[in-house]
Amino acid sequence: METQSWSSDFRGNKGFTQWDVHSANATGFGAAADDYMDKGIDLNEQLIQNKAATFFMRMNSEAMIGAGIHAGDILVIDRSLQAFSGKVVVACLNGEMMVRRLEKNFNKIRLVPDTDKLAAIDVDLNGCEFFIWGVVTWVIHRVG
Amino acid sequence: MVAIVDCNSFYCSCERLFQPKLHKHPVVVLSNNDGCIISRSDEARQLGIPMAGPYYMAKEVIEKHDVAVFSSNYNLYGDISRRVMETLKQIVGETNVEVYSIDESFLHLDGYSPHQLTKTARQIKETVEHWTGIPVSVGIAPTKVLSKVANRLAKKDPKKYKGVFVLDNLQTIDEALAQTSVKEIWGIGRRYAEKLESQFNLQTALALKNMNEAWAGKNLGGVVGVRLWRELNGEPCIELKDPLIKKKMIACTRMFGRPVTNIIEIREAVASYASRAAEKLRRQSGAAKVMEVFLVKNDHTDVYTYNPSTDALKFVLPEATSATHQLINYALPLANKLFNAGSRYLKAGIILSQLVPDKEIQGNLFTQKNKPSVKLMEVMDNINWGIHKDAVRFGAAGLKQPWQMKQEHRSFRYTTQWDELKLVE
C-alpha cells in the first residue's frame, strides 16, 4: 500500500514488549520450542498501517456487494492514503457519506457502486461539495 | 524555532468529522451538563453567539439559525486529540512535541531549514488535516510566546495567512506585536492586562516588548514576568517540558443533572467523583496526601452559593494513597458533615492535593502496607480501561445515578465504541 510523504513506523502492536512473549514452559525435547516462541499474530499489524489515521465505520447498505462489502461489515479506513482511481473510498457528496469505487480520469470524477441496483454518480466539482473522507483498506465480514 | 499547532474550534471540528453535512454550518458544543457554550465554529461566532456564555441565553439565535448543538463528547475529543498529537510526533519526532492541552502542541523545529519554515508549517498543517480531518493553525517564531502571537494572527485572518504564519525576523515580529494587544499575550491575565493598560498606558505587545528588563522584573511579576518579556524579545525562556506533565492537584467536580436534596444521592455523587479522581491519580502514578470535598448549593436565588468556610472540608490523610476505596472512605464522612437537610445542591466536587509519586509513599507507623489495594486497583483499572469505563466500580457510587449530569445532545463515540461506529451507505 502506498503512503504519504510521512511514513508511519507503527506496527499495530499496542506496545508489545519482549516480556509479553510467553515462554514455552516446556522441558525435555520440547525445550527447544522456547527458542521459537514469538509474539503470535496480532490483527492490528495486518489491518492498521497508520494508527493515527485509521478509523472504523460500519457499512449500512449493499451498494458495494460486488466488492465483497456487505451491510453490517466493519470497514477499515485509512485517511493518510492517496485516493487513486480504482480505490474503494468513503466519499462525501453534498454532506452525505457513501462508500463507492472512485473513478478519476482527466477532470472527471465518478462514484461507482458495485451492484446493479444503483447507478454511478457523476460528480460535478463546480456544482457540489465533494471530498474524499478516506480510503477503505480492509473489510471485516462475519461469516455465518 | 518553536511552532504551536492549534486545532481550530477543536470540539466542533471533531463533531463535523463524522457529520460532513455540518461542514460550513454553524456548530456549538456545550459544557458538562449542557450549561455553557465551550466551543463554537467560525460560523457560530459570526452569528454573535458568545464563547463561554450560558446555553439558554443563546437558544433563540441557535434555533433561528438552525445551529447544530452537541453535548460534550470527551471520549471522541480525547481520541481525536491523541491522533493529532501522534501525527505531529510522526512528523517532527516524538521528543520534539510538547502536548500543551487537548487541542494544542508546541513543536521544537531546530532541525528544519530556517528558509523553508513556511513550507514546513504548511506541510504540518496539511498532514494533520489529511490524516485526522481536523483543521489546524500553525504559528512559528523564535519563542513560545511569539509563536502564540503568530498563531493568533494566522487564525484571525485566514484569507491572508491560510492558517500559517512564521515570525522569523525582527521586522515581522514587531509588526505582529503592534497588532496584538497586551491582553492577547499568552500568559498575561485579564487583571494584569488592565493594570498594564491603565497604569502604564501600554496598549500593544510591541510597547511591552520595548520596556526594559528591570521594569519587567519590577512590574510584571518577578521572574515569570522577566521570562515573558525575554520571550517577547526573541529569547527562548520557557522550556519544552516533558510531554506528560504531572499535575500538582487533581480535581473532579461536576454539576448535577437536577438539584439534589437528599444525602444518599450526595454520597453517591461524592463516591463517584472520588473514584474518577483516584483513577486520574493512578494514571500519573501518584498518591494524594490531602483531600477536599465541597458542595455547591442554590437555596433562594438564581445564583450559586458557595462559601468555602462552610461548604468545603479539607482532610489530611494518615497516609498518601491512590486506592479508590480508601479515598471513598475518607470522602463520605466529609460529605455527611457538609450536607445540610433542606438545601438544594447543584454541584459537588473533590480535590486531591499534596501529590507524591506512589513509589515514595511515606510509611506511617500505624498503618498497614498497601500491597493488596495496589493489586486490586491495577486489576480494576485494567478492566475499566480495557473493556469500558465503569465496568467495575464501587457500590458506594450508586447504580442508577439519577443525579448524573444532562447530556441530551451527545453524538456517538465513533472512535472508541464498537457499537457506536459511524454508519455509511
Image: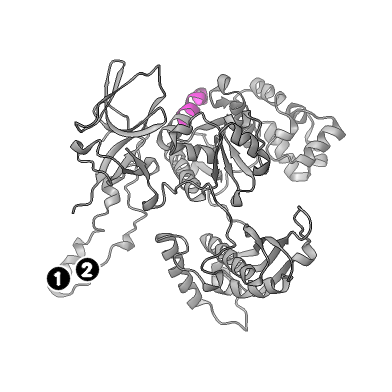
Which region of the structure is painted magenta?
B113-124
State which chain disc 1 sits on.
A
- Residue situated in front as seen by the camera: B298 or A39: B298
**Counting other residues with Cα less than 10 Å from the Cα at mark 2, is it few (<14), some (14-19), or many (20 or more)?**
some
Residue drawn at 71 percent across, 63 percent down: B344
Q: Quadrant of residue B338?
A: bottom right
Secondary structure under tag 2 reads loop
Is residue B364 shown above or below B73?
below
Q: Position of residue A92 (x, y in %)?
A: 38, 30
Kindly identify the amino acid type of the residue bearing the numbered disc 2: Ala
Q: Quick check: is B406 in the magenta stretch?
A: no
For marks 2 and 1 on the same chain, the one whose residue lies earlier in the sequence: 2
Main SS category, magenta section: helix
Quadrant of the image occupied by residue B404: bottom right
| Tag 2–tag 1 contact (CB < 8 Å) | yes
The disc placed on residue A30 is 1
| Residue B33 percent across, percent down from the top left | 60, 52
Picture disc at residue A24: 2
Q: Amino acid at mark 1?
A: Gly
Query: How far apart in space, not on screen, are marks 2 and 1 (Cα)?
Result: 8 Å
- Residue B121: say if magenta: yes
Where is the N terminus of chain B found, in terms of image quarters? top right
Chain under disc 2: A
Nearer to us in this view, B360 or A144:
A144
Classify mark 1: helix, strand or loop.
Answer: helix
Badge 1 crowding class, 10 Å Cα cut-off, few under 14, some 14 to 19, many 20 or more, is few
Q: Position of residue A140 (x, y in %)?
A: 25, 47
Residue located farthest toward the bottom when viewing the structure as drawn: B366
